[in-house]
Image (cartoon, rainbow, N blue to C red):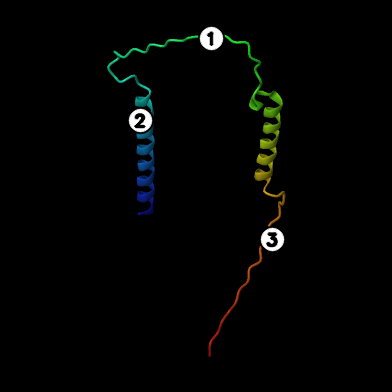
Amino acid sequence: MKKSMETMKYKLMFFLFAMMNATILLAQDGGGDGGTSVTVSKSTTSSSTTMSEDWYTSPWVWIVGAAVFILLLIALVRGGGRSEVHKTTVRKDVSTD
């Protein structure tokens, strides 16, 4: 029974995954008839303004962000660095007269 439920769960997950992919692929289609056309028009204007860089375009921001990400990843994977696990089992026997 447990195996059949697990098999059904995997079939349902596969079905939902397939439907999601089909929806995404059809959403990218141009309507299905192939007769759609897209017209793009651009107008350019030039002005002399000074461009300021955004903070996320600087390389040092990406380097610091990557370093922080790697340090967090290492900290999570190591799990505190303890390799020993101490377990204590407490057993209580209760007897009634």
* Dots 1, 3 in contact, CB < 8 A: no
Q: Residue at x 38, y 28 (%)?
A: 24
* Residue 48 drawn at (x, y percent): 63, 11
- Nearest the eye: 8 or 75: 75
Q: Nearer the viewer, mark 2 or mark 3?
A: 2
- 36 to the left or right of 46: left
Secondary structure type for disc 3 = loop
Secondary structure type for disc 1 = loop
The amino acid type, in three-letter code, at marker 2 is Thr
Q: Residue at x 66, y 63 (%)?
A: 87
Other-residue count near label 1 (Cα within 10 Å), few / some / many at <14 / 14–19 / ≥20 = few
* Residue 38 drawn at (x, y percent): 37, 13
Which residue does the numbered mark 2 point to in the structure image?
23
Which residue does the numbered mark 1 point to in the structure image?
45
Cα–Cα span, label 1 and label 3: 71 Å
- 82 to the left or right of 37: right
Point out the tag, 2 or 3, that comes first from the N-terminus. Answer: 2
The amino acid type, in three-letter code, at marker 3 is His
* Residue 90 drawn at (x, y percent): 63, 71
Cα–Cα span, label 2 and label 1: 39 Å
Q: Nearer the viewer, mark 1 or mark 3?
A: 1
Secondary structure type for disc 2 = helix
- 21 to the left or right of 52: left
Other-residue count near label 3 (Cα within 10 Å), few / some / many at <14 / 14–19 / ≥20 = few
- Nearest the eye: 71 or 91: 71
Q: Is residue 82 above or below residue 61?
A: below
Number of the label disc, if any, that sits on residue 86: 3
Q: Is residue 80 above or below residue 29?
A: below
Residue 16 figure quarter? top left
Number of the label disc, if any, that sits on residue 54: none
Point out the tag, 2 or 1, that comes first from the N-terminus. Answer: 2
* Dots 2, 1 in contact, CB < 8 A: no
